[in-house]
Image (tube, rainbow, N blue to C red):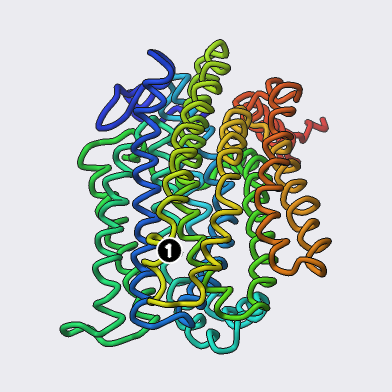
Amino acid sequence: MMADAAPESRSVPPRGGRRDLTSGPITRTLLAFALPTLASNMLQSLNGSINAIWVGRFLGEDALAATSNANLIMFLMFAGVFGFGMAATIIVGQNVGRRDIAEARRALGTAMGAFVGVAAVIAVLGWVFAPALLRLLATPGEAMPMALAYLRVIFLSMPSAFLMVLLMMGLRGVGDSLTPLWFMGVNVVLDSTLNPVFILGLGPAPALGIAGSAVATLIASVVSLAAMIAYIYARDLPIRLRGPEWRYLIPNGALMRVILGKGFPMGLQMLVVSGAAIAMIGIVNREGVVVTAAYGVTQQLWTYIQMPAMAVGAAVSAMAAQNIGAGRWDRLSRITRSAIIINTIITGGLVVLLTIVDKAALGLFLQDGSPALPIARHIQLVGSWGFVLFGMTLVLFGIVRANGAVYGPLLILFASMVPVRLGLTWLFYPRFGIEALWWSFPAGSIASAGLSILYYKYGRWREVRLIEEIHQEEAKERSFADGEPGGSLQPTG
């Protein structure tokens, strides 16, 4: 372990919006931590929806189909780094539970030092290979030029967006879900305000069309990241680095191996979801621009429906990690039960609400009389209720991953996405057409929820010891260093 950090960094009292997740009433603490995360996620979704409204209203269905294809690629890119950020956040949470803030900073520093550089490389490669990626998605020809213009600029925003995501995940790992909310708000206000400015060329801004929407996203990402970093240092929040702690940005070998070992399967989980989504949108694209637009606007509604589940899942993961680090295993079953109840109430309520007002909600994204509207309403009616089961799956995944168990959730997701969701689509598509794809969504949710319950009850995820793995990796490093040829020479005479 590194011992040259300032003494106060070993244990830091709560500051800003930070909470102790290892004590107090579970349901109230979980709600207080999850609600800002939910608000942050909903703001992010609102931002995407507002931008889709600008694009759909000003530029039409071809442009909306273009952004749907480009945004799916961006989700795929973020999935590649998400797992590693989640692995670092779990290590941060367990160390916070152990009251070891120095090790929490070291874990987050290793993740930032390693993956922001990777994001810069991805941005360059993405610009170059954007046309090939869009062709791989079978992007409709009429949407291709706009999708390419939009995607290339979006790729440039990736380094700042990746760093912002890592910082937000790190803050939640130490128990602070309020600071990410404030700066997600800054990002949303800037992005949604600048979108029409650069799309239409208002004032001194050039009229960039669909590329203007991406330029607004780039500017908002850079400005909100700079503001958040300034705030972290102004408030001296626990994840800040000072003095000798700056060396934590040089990736630590032992930590990096554990982050990669745990993060790769979690990243694969996102890639499995993304890969299935790409396969699905490839099928949708073959049905024409109207069906693609209908599917795209339905995705906008579904982002809202799944936000509570994602927020509760993230809160559960941070809460469970801190309690595991503190040795409070007695609280895990109560955390699980409370989270499932909370998710069912909130997500179920949203499904009912959006089913009642779906025509008006979907009409926000489509021009009056659009033939895509009845198709979108049907997709929403068939698939939305499965998100209640999806939320249960995320809660159970959050609990087991907080202890470093990552392969069980990966296998469950693969089974529900590939053999079930894609398999059913390919099996029944020749007979029922695109209808087979819509019904595959609830089928996949049923499969993932059932398998995750079995894994939570009977799997061996409780036997994993994440912090011990890091110590073992560091011991291997020291042993290897001691065994270097220069250190093993023996006197000859």
Q: Position of residue 10 (x, y in %)?
A: 39, 23
Q: Position of residue 473 (x, y in %)?
A: 67, 32
- Residue at x 30% of width, y 37% of height: 178
Amino acid type of disc 1? Leu
Q: Is residue 397 visible?
A: yes
66 relative to 16, above or below: below
Q: Closest to the observer: 58 or 18? A: 58
Query: Callout 1: helix, strand or loop?
Result: helix
Q: Closest to the observer: 224 or 114? A: 224
Q: Closest to the observer: 341 or 88? A: 341
Residue indicated by mark 1: 362
Q: Closest to the observer: 458 or 461? A: 458
- Residue at x 75% of width, y 42% of height: 411
- Quadrant for residue 439, please give it: bottom right
- Quadrant for residue 118, please give it: bottom right
Q: Position of residue 126 (x, y in %)?
A: 55, 74
Quadrant (top left/top right/bottom left/bottom right) for the C terminus: top right
Taking the view exactly as shown, the residue that stands out farthest to the top is 330
95 relative to 442, above or below: above
Q: Position of residue 27 (x, y in %)?
A: 42, 20
Q: Is residue 121 visible?
A: no
